[in-house]
Image: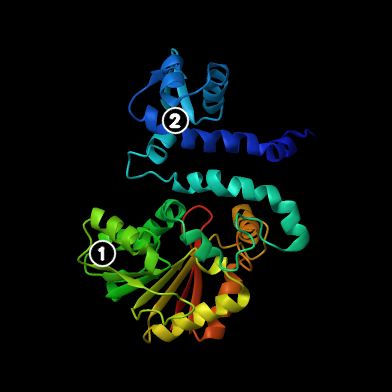
Amino acid sequence: MSPERIFGIGMGFWGAKALLSAVELGVFARLGQGGARLAELTRDLGLHERAARDFLDALVALNLLEREDGVYRNSPETDFFLDRAKPSYVGGLLEMANARLYQSWGGLTEALRTGQRQSEEKEAEDFFGALYSDPERLRGFLAAMSGVSAGPAAMIASKIPWRNYKSFVDVGAAQGMVPVTVARAHPHLSGFGFDLPVVRPVFEEFVARHGLSDRLRFTPGDFFKDPLPKADVIVMGHILHDWSLEEKRALLAKAHEALPKGGMLVAYDAVIDDERRENAFGLLMSLNMLIETPGGFDYTGADCQGWMREAGFAETRVEHLAGPDSMVIGVK
């Protein structure tokens, strides 16, 4: 018996912060331009000579970088996912983790004792209003949502029988990763991104960059105050877990009202396994909602199916997407 696993978890923040700082410093973007030696990286990244070698070699030991004959290079994984110059970049989530979540999680013990969120501006009544009020933080958050949604979006594009539908709306669309991914895969579809008005320019810029402005439009609104746009399919990605049980039920009821008979609701999150034993990421994400939001929490597939049936959905099912994410589907 060894305490190695316990130490690995307890000191896991060492490796996490090394990765987050590497993203912040642009290590993977620099090496995306080609391999480099220690002296070059020290200069190009603005590192202190005391820190550079240990930092870069720690990234090698973590299998985030490779080093051969004194030349550092990205690993295949970090070259694909963490080079900002590549369309496959998913580092937005890590950028947000570094800028906001890393510090906020220092308040987990207090959150566990009080049930109160611990993120910045924790006294603000409207968490998302405060977050969206800063243009730089808004763009960072929306980019992070694209990063965390890229994998699930690809699976949603392939798993849903889209040939049976003509239109869809992504509620809480952020940059528009899901609408863009679905529309690119299915040219017959037209869609909407529904989000707060301040998101419009970011969404429209992202959609235009992918050449889909003719089929994807932005509809401004507040999903608690305004009716949802009508469409054959409604997608709610990483939305339900932000809210309390009462608010979750209200959103599901609104979705049911907006759908035609036979229409489909797709709600995806890091859905917790029904036995609450296996999806550690989903359970930790629920703690993240404790830290970040006034009433949010993650849920099991059985939980969500029950709420959907209460809202009037005739058929429900759960399907795995990618990584820790699953979708709960309700058919009206």
The residue singled out by tag 1 in the image is 186
Residue 111 drawn at (x, y percent): 72, 58
Mark 1 and mark 2 in contact? Answer it, CB < 8 Å: no
Residue 28 lies in quadrant: top left
Task: Decide: is 235 above or below 177.
Answer: below
Q: Secondary structure at mark 2?
A: helix
Locate the C terminus by quadrant.
bottom left
Q: Secondary structure at mark 1?
A: loop
Where is residue 273 drawn, in percent x and y? Answer: 61, 62
- Which quadrant does the N terminus fall into? top right
Tell me if mark 2 has few (under 14), some (14-19) or many (20+) residues whose alpha carbon lies within 10 angstroms of its own.
many
Q: Out of 33 and 231, give the one closest to the viewer.
A: 33
Point out the frontmost of discs 1 and 2: 2
- Residue at 50 percent of width and 79 percent of height: 252
At a point 34% along the width and 58% down the height, the residue shown is: 202
Identify residue for label 2. 27
Disc 1 packing (10 Å; few <14; some 14–19; many ≥20): some
Q: Which mark is residue 117?
A: none
- Disc 1 marks which amino acid? His
Residue 246 image point, x, y percent: 61, 79
Within the image, what quadrant is residue 296 found in?
bottom right
Task: Tell me the amino acid under the disc marked 2.
Answer: Val
Marks 1/2: CA distance? 36 Å
**Camera-side residue of 108 and 125:** 125
Q: Earlier in the sequence, mark 1 or mark 2?
A: 2
